[in-house]
Image (tube, rainbow, N blue to C red):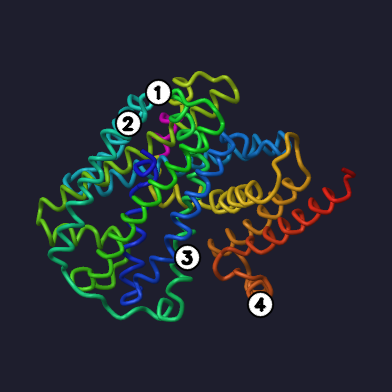
Amino acid sequence: MTFALFLGAGNLIFPPLMAQQAGEYWLLAIAGFLLTAVGLPALTIIVLGRLSSADKLTSSLPKWMDRSFWILVLTTLGPAFVLPRAVTVAYEMGIKPFVNDNYLFIFSISFCALTLLLALKPGRLVDYIGKVMTPALISMLALLIIAAIINPLGSTSPATDIYKQAPTVNGLIQGYMTLDAIAAVAFGWVIIQAIKSKGVTSTKAIAKYSRWIAGIYAILMSSCYLAMGYLGATSSNIAPNALNGGEILTRYAAGEFGQAGQVLLAAITLMACLTTTIGLTNANAQYYKNTYRTPFKISATLILGLTAIVSNFGLETIIEVSLPAILILCPIAIALILATVSLPLPNKPSTTHTVIVLIATLFGTIDALSILDKLPLTVIEPLTKWLPFYSAHMSWLVPVFITIVISKLLSFRSEKMIPA
């Protein structure tokens, strides 16, 4: 189930383009990609499972910061950005190639209605996604991948300059930019609820099953990324100098299966987007039910109603408005995970955890402004010179790491000062 939740259309598009650009170094690039694109979400699932509840991740923050974090994360991953993007991508890749007129409005309403129908029974989420959709998605992907292995449509091309110099590092950066770490924080609500719905209640058992889930997710997702990377690496003949991974997949599917390949790719995209929208709707509605006692049905209906409206603004507008928020929130989420792994989790608001979040917010904002090209040159030059990992859009990493290390040393000192 977890594999299908994470496998949105964006996850299918990233690796092929990266692998094509990496050329003969594509395996090294994919190795770096897997460390962040798979490793960070897997770690997040394990940590949330150990806590036995997703909201405990922010229990060490002041209440206003706790609530603000979850509302911003779930709104951004929900009706403000990721849900409408999933609906729009499903239409662009799954429906638009087969129709002449613009049916986005009708499609968005229909797609959101189907999502609502499947999301309204969270107790059966494992049955819907785990037992039906995931096997179907894996089968369709396997068909395309096996065809590519038996009949590759090209060979690897020379790597671009950036991948010649540091393929693994650049793969690592691309994996981070999938932003799946923050998606894992939201899906934590769904995964833990799914475990509990099967009668598992003890903290130890939830942690155990979460580790198993993270392991299975990591194996399946890594296999998928490797396969998508292989398609990209062998696509230079049919999709030379592709602008995006979607173009590579479209041409590869058509090259292997003709018109049937386009239908296969459309089915994969629709299924991938549907599982993502179901999971994110469930995560949003679950949070508002647990925190504000809002009925699940009402929350889910409102979320998908907003999603259907926002979907019609166009993909470029959705990204332009919402991307800054998710670029800032992702470092905060990772910082909280790292702090939870490294430091004791207090039962009340902690100054240490609050400072870590504030530092991640500050440097995450700098990274977001850099990615969006909103910083003046007079600011960029000193940042590039003095701020580690600024060019990789991870300038928050070293300050957060230093803060955690100092906090850990201070906690050791405090423990030694306490008389036995």
- Say which of marks 1 and 2 sits in front: 1
Q: Gap in Å between the C-alphas at discs 4 and 3?
A: 21 Å
**Mark 1 residue type:** Gly
Report which residue position mark 1 lands on. 123
Contact (CB < 8 A) between labels 4 and 2? Answer: no
Q: Gap in Å between the C-alphas at discs 1 and 2?
A: 24 Å
Q: Residues within 10 Å of mark 3 (few under 14, many from 20)?
A: many
- Say which of marks 3 and 2 sits in front: 3
Report which residue position mark 2 lands on. 109
Q: Is residue 321 visible?
A: no
Q: Is residue 197 visible?
A: yes
Residue at left offset 63%, top offset 35%: 56
State whether the magenta stretch is mostly helix, strand or loop.
Answer: helix
Report which residue position mark 3 lands on. 172
Q: Secondary structure at mark 3?
A: helix
Coordinates of residue 230 in the picture (x, y in percent): 27, 65
Q: Mark 4 or 2 closer to N-term?
A: 2
Please tell me the numbered disc located at residue 356: none
**Mark 3 residue type:** Leu
Q: Gap in Å between the C-alphas at discs 4 and 2?
A: 49 Å
Please tell me the numbered disc located at residue 385: 4
